[in-house]
Image: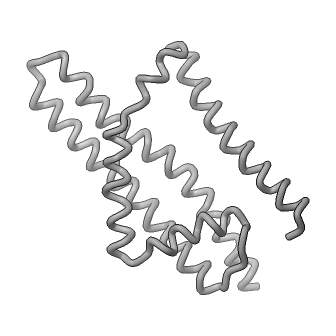
Amino acid sequence: MNTNKKRKSNLKRILAIGFLLLSLIGTVSMGMGMSGIRLFVDIPSLILIILFTLPMLILADLFEDFIRGYKIATGSFEYTLKELKASKNAMDLCIKLVYISSVIGAIIGFVSFLRYIGDLSKVGPAIAVSILTVFYAFIINLVQHAVSAKIKKEIIYREQ
C-alpha cells in the first residue's frame, strides 16, 4: 500500500472514531447538557469488562491473535490466511466475552441494588453499574464488530 493510500485509510479511521465519539457526546448532551456526560463515566464497570475479557483471551491462548486483529484492521502489515483466520476467531471470542462480562456486571449491579434497596442514596450507583456495564459492552463491541468485519473481508479476498 503506498503512503498516500495509507494516509487516506488512517484518516478515514480517525474520522469514523471521531464521529462515533461526537455522536455519543452529542446524544448525551442534548438530553442532559454537557454535565450529563460525567454520569456516563464509571471506571468500575469498564474495569469489570477488561478484567473478565482479557484473562479469558489469555486462557484460550488467543491474546496475540486478538492484538494482531487490530494490527490487521490498521492495514499496517501483511499476514497469512492462517493468521487472518486465527485473528478472526480471537475477535469473535472477544465479542462474546465482552457481552458475557456485561451480563455479569449487570448481575453484580442488581445484587448490589437489592442489598441497598432500603438506602436510596446507594440504589442509584448500584443501578448505574449494571446499566453502564452493558452500555460500555455495546460501545466496545461496535468497534470490535468493525475490526472483525475488516478481517473477514481480508479472508474473503485471500480465499478467492
Q: Quadrant of the N terminus?
A: bottom right
Along the line of sight, the residue nearer the viewer: 132 or 68: 68
Which of the 4 image quadrants contains residue 158?
Answer: bottom right
Number of residue marks:
0
Residue visible at 58% across and 31% down in the picture? 24
Residue visible at 80% across and 56% down in the picture? 9
Along the line of sight, the residue nearer the viewer: 77 or 84: 77
Along the line of sight, the residue nearer the viewer: 148 or 78: 78
Q: Give percent across and percent down for residue 13.
A: 72, 50
Q: Give percent across and percent down for residue 93.
A: 43, 67
Residue visible at 37% across and 33% down in the picture? 42
Q: Give the answer, above or below, for where 11 lies relative to 119.
A: below
Residue visible at 79% across and 49% down in the picture? 11
| Left or right for 90, reference 117 | right
Visual colour scheme: one colour
| Left or right for 14, reference 130 | right
Q: Give the answer, above or below, for where 83 lies relative to 136.
A: below
Q: Quadrant of the C terminus?
A: bottom right
Q: Give percent across and percent down for residue 34.
A: 54, 16
| Left or right for 93, reference 12 | left
Q: Give the answer, above or below, for where 141 lies relative to 135.
A: below
Q: Give percent across and percent down for residue 54.
A: 38, 62
